[in-house]
């Protein structure tokens, strides 16, 4: 049971972070389908930082440096989307899809190049970071507390405050609802949209890092992040683009994702004799069902997906 | 002299010509970026590696071997072509079918199950692949039409659900000692697509079958349906403006579902003509969806969203993907071609901007020329 809670919380943290990323980007008016790719790149940045950090660095510093690395890489990668979608008015779905393909391919090429450079026989795409990962975890009794759970919670509160209580957040939302109106009162729509995309890149990158450190101590980059970026988008839609609802939605999805990891610990579930594949499918099936119920009265930002053109009324 | 200038301008203004130029630019820039990445990884062999990617089967010195591998590339390209037609068909109706990958997967599952477990002949297997894939596509379409579910997200979810289901289903027909399905050649020869003597053309490459021809025929069929029939016109109208289409008396919900079913069927067809040649067996422990469907997106956009252009674009994408296997593996990895095709998709996002820029540039030049002539006249 404890294990289930632990896994639920950690997967929910991933989903909260990435879904908040999507939320910021969409509130500014840019659909970020490329979160999956951004997650992979952020994870790569964090993993390489963990790999190259010398042993003996204090735990606090390790956490800080690794987070900075993955956030920065995620942001830089999200600029690909920003430049194409904001500056060049490209189709956001197409560019997002390109990011999803670009992220894993770039990560595999890079990791393999590093591995091959270390020894010619090593052609795997795996990065091991067992040592550094221990800094994230604190044991409270038998419960493995992961600092990222706290960070995700804090960022969730911060997102709520920023979106609804600050000038920046309200302006950001204005750019996603009616950019022409926002522009007419002197808000720089392009700047706001860049801000939205960059925040989503940073959060997405961080989410990727949390995902690969959840439970394992090495990551094979050929696997990518198994559709988590899209699950996060489903969480975001389920949460109706509102931070608090996103948090609750993420807990639900996290629970189903965690079940596939720990269902063997429950006698009731084992007795049902359902093949493990079904549990693997569960999060995806649930999200489809959930989407059916919530998409009808969707409160998506009105201008999302439409490139902003100053000359247009 | 003046007339000649005018003619040249006209070509530059031609939309089709602009598309071709834009696609070629995407290819060149994509390859250049690939080359730079190779240079960064290891400057020593970069030139040789990029040449290996571009040359693909020409890597073999003997004409016989080259022809054989040309055939293999063609077989893979024909499956890719079907996936990109699927993406293209949906995109013309305003839907982004990122589910081509998942539809391809269930198509593969269906045709292999019918061939291996039920012992059906190839045409039954092929139809099964098309129908099951169309069904999966139809689910996304119905969710979009009736519940307003974003088709991109529902497609991705179905990709994963499809992959796990197919893995489960095909575990029943796998070989005892390996994670691969039994081969069609040894289990059920009647499920193999007929070669029609095409294998002889490609140095007895038995994987070159009727499928390659069917894929090209389907490309032409898609073009005819979209451009020359009332049905295609209705679909495109629905894609441009759902409300307007409804107002004109078209059944917009039915059109959306039908589009996704056709798109799904096309992907399933691609899976059929690929797996029913026996060229590859399904690995039942696969943890990621095959890249075929995603590369289909690249090919569709690189082909300028025109079915005939897609034929060439699919071949090109497959050509460099296959070429990636010939790079020096002590220095680089085969995924470098995935990186190049991902970059090409990314660059395709700029095509619209490029066209606007080109037209603006031509306008300016014309204006200048006009002004010059006027001045000349006054003097």
Image (spheres, coloured by chain):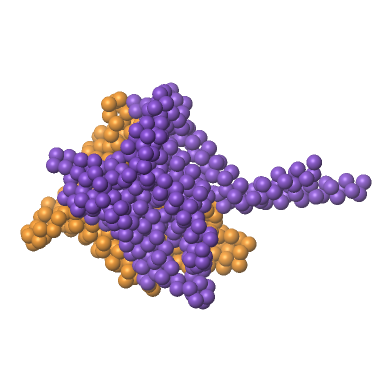
Query: How far from the left and from the top, in percent, is residue B316?
Result: 46, 40
Q: Is residue B217 toward the left or the right of residue B280 in the image?
A: right
B294 or A313, which is in the foreground? B294
What residue lies at 39% left-to-right and 27% top-to-bottom? B64
B306 or B241, which is in the foreground? B306
Count the marks: how many? 0
- Chain letter for purple? B
On the image, which quarter does residue A64 sit in? top left
Quick one: which residue is furthest to the front in this view? B197
Residue A29 in sight in this render: no
Residue B62 sits above or below residue A138 on the image: above
Query: How far from the left and from the top, in percent, is residue B155?
Result: 35, 58
B166 or A176, which is in the foreground? B166
What residue lies at 61% left-to-right and 51% top-to-bottom? B15
Q: Is residue A246 toward the left or the right of residue B30 in the image?
A: left
Residue B188 in sight in this render: yes
Query: How far from the left and from the top, in percent, is residue B115?
Result: 23, 50
What residue lies at 46% left-to-right and 35% top-to-bottom? B34
Location of the N terminus of chain B by quadrant is: top right
A88 or B259, which is in the foreground? B259
What residue lies at 35% left-to-right and 67% top-to-bottom? B143
Query: How far from the left and from the top, in percent, is residue B257?
Result: 39, 66
Quick one: which residue is furthest to the right in this view? B379
- Chain letter for orange? A
């Amino acid at each position: 049971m404890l294990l289930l809670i632990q896994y639920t919380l950690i997967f929910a943290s991933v989903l909260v972070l990435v879904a908040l990323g999507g939320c910021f980007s969409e509130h500014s008016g840019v659909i970020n389908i490329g979160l999956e790719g951004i997650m992979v790149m952020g994870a790569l940045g964090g993993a390489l930082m963990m790999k190259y950090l010398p042993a003996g660095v204090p735990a606090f510093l390790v956490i800080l440096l690794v987070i900075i690395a993955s956030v920065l890489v995620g942001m830089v990668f999200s600029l690909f989307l920003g430049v194409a979608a904001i500056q060049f008015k490209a189709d956001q779905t197409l560019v997002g899809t390109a990011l999803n393909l670009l992220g894993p391919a770039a990560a595999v090429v890079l990791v393999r190049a590093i591995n091959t450079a270390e020894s010619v026989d090593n052609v795997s795409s795996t990065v091991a970071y067992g040592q550094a990962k221990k800094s994230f975890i604190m044991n409270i009794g038998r419960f493995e507390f992961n600092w990222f759970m706290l960070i995700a919670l804090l960022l969730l509160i911060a997102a709520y405050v920023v979106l609804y209580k600050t000038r920046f957040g309200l302006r950001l939302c204005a750019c996603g609802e009616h950019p022409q109106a926002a522009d007419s009162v002197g808000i720089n729509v392009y700047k706001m949209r860049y801000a939205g995309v960059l925040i989503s890149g940073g959060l997405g990158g961080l989410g990727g890092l949390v995902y690969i450190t959840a439970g394992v101590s090495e990551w094979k980059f050929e696997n990518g992040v198994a559709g988590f970026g899209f699950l996060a988008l489903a969480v975001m839609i389920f949460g109706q683009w509102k931070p608090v609802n996103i948090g609750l939605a993420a807990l639900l999805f996290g629970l189903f994702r965690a079940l596939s990891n720990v269902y063997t610990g429950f006698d009731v579930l084992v007795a049902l004799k359902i093949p493990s594949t079904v549990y693997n499918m569960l999060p995806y099936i649930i999200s489809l069902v959930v989407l059916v119920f919530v998409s009808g009265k969707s409160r998506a930002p009105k201008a999302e997906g439409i490139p902003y053109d100053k000359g247009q009324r | 002299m003046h007339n000649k200038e005018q003619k040249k301008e006209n070509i530059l203004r031609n939309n089709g010509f602009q598309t071709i130029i834009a696609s070629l630019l995407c290819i060149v820039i994509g390859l250049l970026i690939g080359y730079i990445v190779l240079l960064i990884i290891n400057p020593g062999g970069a030139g040789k590696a990029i040449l290996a990617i571009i040359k693909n089967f020409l890597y073999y010195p003997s004409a016989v071997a080259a022809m054989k591998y040309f055939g293999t590339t063609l077989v893979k390209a024909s499956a890719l072509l079907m996936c990109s037609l699927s993406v293209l068909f949906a995109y013309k109706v305003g839907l982004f079918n990122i589910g081509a990958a998942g539809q391809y997967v269930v198509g593969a599952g269906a045709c292999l199950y019918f061939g291996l477990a039920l012992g059906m002949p190839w045409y039954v297997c092929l139809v099964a692949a098309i129908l099951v894939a169309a069904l999966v596509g139809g689910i996304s379409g119905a969710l979009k039409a009736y519940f307003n579910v974003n088709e991109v997200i529902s497609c991705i979810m179905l990709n994963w659900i499809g992959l796990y289901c197919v893995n489960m289903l095909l575990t029943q027909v796998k070989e005892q000692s390996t994670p691969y399905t039994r081969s069609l050649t040894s289990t059920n020869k009647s499920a193999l697509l007929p070669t029609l003597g095409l294998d002889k053309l490609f140095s007895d490459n038995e994987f070159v079958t009727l499928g390659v021809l069917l894929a090209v025929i389907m490309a032409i069929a898609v073009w005819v349906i979209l451009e020359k029939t009332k049905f295609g016109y209705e679909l495109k109208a629905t894609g441009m403006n759902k409300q307007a289409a409804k107002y004109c008396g078209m059944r917009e919900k039915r059109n959306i579902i039908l589009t996704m079913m056709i798109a799904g069927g096309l992907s399933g067809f691609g899976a059929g003509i690929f797996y029913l040649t026996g060229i590859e067996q399904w690995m039942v422990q696969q943890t990621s969806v095959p890249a075929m469907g995603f590369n289909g997106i690249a090919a569709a956009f690189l082909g300028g969203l025109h079915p005939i252009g897609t034929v060439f674009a699919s071949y090109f994408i497959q050509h460099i993907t296959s070429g990636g296997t010939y790079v020096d593996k002590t220095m680089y990895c085969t995924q470098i071609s995935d990186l190049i095709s991902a970059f090409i998709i990314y660059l395709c996002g700029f095509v619209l901007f490029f066209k606007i820029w080109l037209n603006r540039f031509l306008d300016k030049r014309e204006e200048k020329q006009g002004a010059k002539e006027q001045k000349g006249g006054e003097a």
